[in-house]
């Protein structure tokens, strides 16, 4: 007997069977992409930064360009990023091969449990969301590599070797970018890297099948990434859009370039640059320091916190920021993207520094939490425009 639609956990197989957008994937009117109003002008100025000179005498200029890009856009693209073209091509090739495997083979990796370190799934979180997204994805924890690689798919046969090489290269690039970002804020080069505990690295391999009616659904609706920094590899097909003002701007692929964006954890870390000026004039600084965690306690201790003004949130939001982005799909081609999410380790404790908590006068604004808790909340809340910081106020 032919399987029924309900037996198709993955979108790829569902759409192969039905050839239309199932009701489960149709967004309510008013929550659809409005494709006609998108700014498609080749990225409309998303900065393109050449990293070639990052390790030479002109490092300062490159660092400043990265700082400006973080400040003005939260998104930028990098060329000469150091990941060999063959490694990038291999990654995309093996990703495509994986998603073209027979259904029975792919389903061996299927799980709808966001807590699993390695899984193939669909949409975002089918356990909690009302409308599904036009995406299947493979999620892989990849640092430390040796802790996870043996659980990765073994088909295609080259998967572990090819993806492992890409993940290692992507991590090296993430560390270089974190160093440059630290410097661009006037911090020690190692500051960000040190503030993230033992570190973690996740990869998604996103597969967006062609969609017969792209105006009805999203690959991914508007969201901010919960981690520190994201490195996105996309194939040649457009789909990523970034919010700028009240418009959505297409970030069309540039051959050889990767897209970099700032995540929620990083947005708060950036407040550190403002501390020397801002702590003297800001009352509500605790809200912003919460994610800075232990590494910055020293800085806080050294400063007297006196006055009342809540401009710091606004200041930090206007500087380096975690920016809303989304993915739309198209009726012509499948699309593959591979974001590397670089993050604090799950056990990194995020809490306001002691010095900022002062009984009734300055009650703690957020309860301490681990990055793991933040991350779980991200998956539970579903994708939405707000980041989930508000969930971490004291009960
Ligand atoms: C993500 C994401 C963008 C893309 O997976 O968080 O934003 O182009 N992906 O697939
Ligand atoms: Ni994202």
Image (cartoon, rainbow, N blue to C red):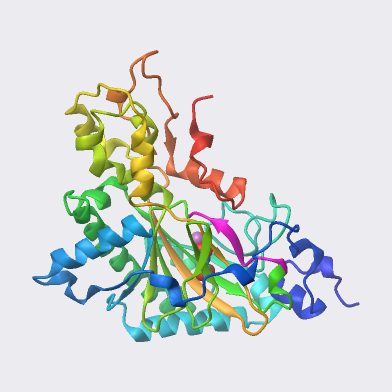
**Number of numbered labels in the structure image:** 0
Q: Is residue 201 visible?
A: yes
**Residue closer to the observer: 196 or 258:** 258
Above or below, 395 against 120 in this view is above
Q: Is residue 158 visible?
A: no
Magenta highlight range: 216-224
Which picture quadrant has residue 200? bottom left
Query: Which residue is pictured at 20% across the width and 61% down the height?
Result: 64
Could you tell whether 236 is left or right of 108 in the image?
left
**Residue closer to the observer: 34 or 263:** 34
Q: Residue furthest top?
A: 360
**Residue closer to the observer: 232 or 273:** 273
Residue 4, given in percent of the width and then of the height, sits at: 86, 71
Above or below, 280 against 241 in this view is above
Q: Residue furthest right?
A: 1
Above or below, 378 against 22 in this view is above
**Residue closer to the observer: 139 or 251:** 251
Q: What quarter of the picture does the C terminus occupy? A: top right
Residue 376, given in percent of the width and then of the height, sits at: 54, 45
Could you tell whether 206 is left or right of 210 in the image?
left
Q: What quarter of the picture does the N terminus occupy? A: bottom right
Could you tell whether 247 is left or right of 195 in the image?
right
Residue 169, given in percent of the width and then of the height, sits at: 32, 72
Task: Indicate yes or no whether the magenta region holds residue 219.
Answer: yes
Query: Which residue is pictured at 75% across the width and 57% down the height?
Result: 28
Residue 142, given in percent of the width and then of the height, sits at: 42, 63
């Amino acid at each position: 007997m032919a399987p029924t639609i309900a037996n198709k956990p993955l979108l790829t197989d569902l759409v192969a069977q039905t050839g239309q957008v199932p009701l489960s994937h149709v967004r309510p009117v008013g929550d659809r992409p409005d494709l006609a109003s998108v700014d498609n002008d080749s990225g409309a100025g998303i900065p393109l930064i050449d990293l070639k000179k990052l390790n030479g005498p002109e490092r300062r200029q490159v660092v400043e360009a990265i700082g400006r890009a973080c400040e003005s856009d939260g998104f930028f693209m990098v060329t000469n990023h150091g990941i060999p073209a063959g490694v990038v091509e291999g990654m995309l090739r093996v990703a495509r091969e994986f998603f073209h495997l027979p259904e029975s083979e792919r389903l061996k990796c299927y799980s709808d449990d966001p807590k699993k370190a390695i899984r193939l799934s669909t949409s975002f979180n089918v356990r909690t969301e009302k409308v599904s997204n036009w995406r299947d994805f493979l999620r892989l924890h990849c640092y430390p590599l040796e802790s996870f690689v043996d659980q990765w798919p073994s088909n295609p046969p080259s998967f572990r070797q090819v993806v492992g090489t890409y993940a290692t290269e992507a991590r090296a690039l993430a560390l270089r970018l974190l160093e440059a970002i630290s410097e661009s804020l006037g911090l020690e080069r190692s500051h960000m890297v040190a503030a993230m505990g033992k570190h973690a690295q996740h990869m998604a391999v996103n597969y967006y099948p062609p969609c017969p009616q792209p105006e009805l659904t999203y690959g991914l609706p508007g969201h901010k990434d919960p981690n520190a920094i994201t490195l996105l590899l996309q194939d040649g097909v457009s789909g990523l859009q970034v919010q700028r003002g009240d418009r959505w701007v297409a970030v069309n692929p540039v051959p050889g370039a990767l897209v970099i964006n700032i995540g929620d954890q990083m947005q708060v870390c950036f407040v550190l640059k403002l501390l020397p000026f801002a702590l003297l004039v800001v009352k509500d600084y605790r809200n912003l320091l919460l994610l800075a965690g232990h590494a910055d306690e020293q800085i806080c201790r050294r400063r007297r916190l006196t006055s009342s003004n809540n401009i710091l949130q606004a200041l930090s939001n206007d500087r380096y920021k975690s920016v809303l982005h989304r993915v739309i799909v198209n009726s012509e081609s499948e699309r593959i993207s591979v974001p590397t999410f670089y993050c604090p380790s799950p056990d990194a404790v995020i809490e306001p520094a002691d010095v900022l908590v002062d009984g009734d006068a300055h009650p703690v604004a957020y309860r301490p939490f681990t990055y793991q808790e933040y991350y779980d909340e991200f998956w539970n809340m579903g994708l939405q425009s707000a980041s989930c910081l508000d969930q971490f106020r004291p009960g």
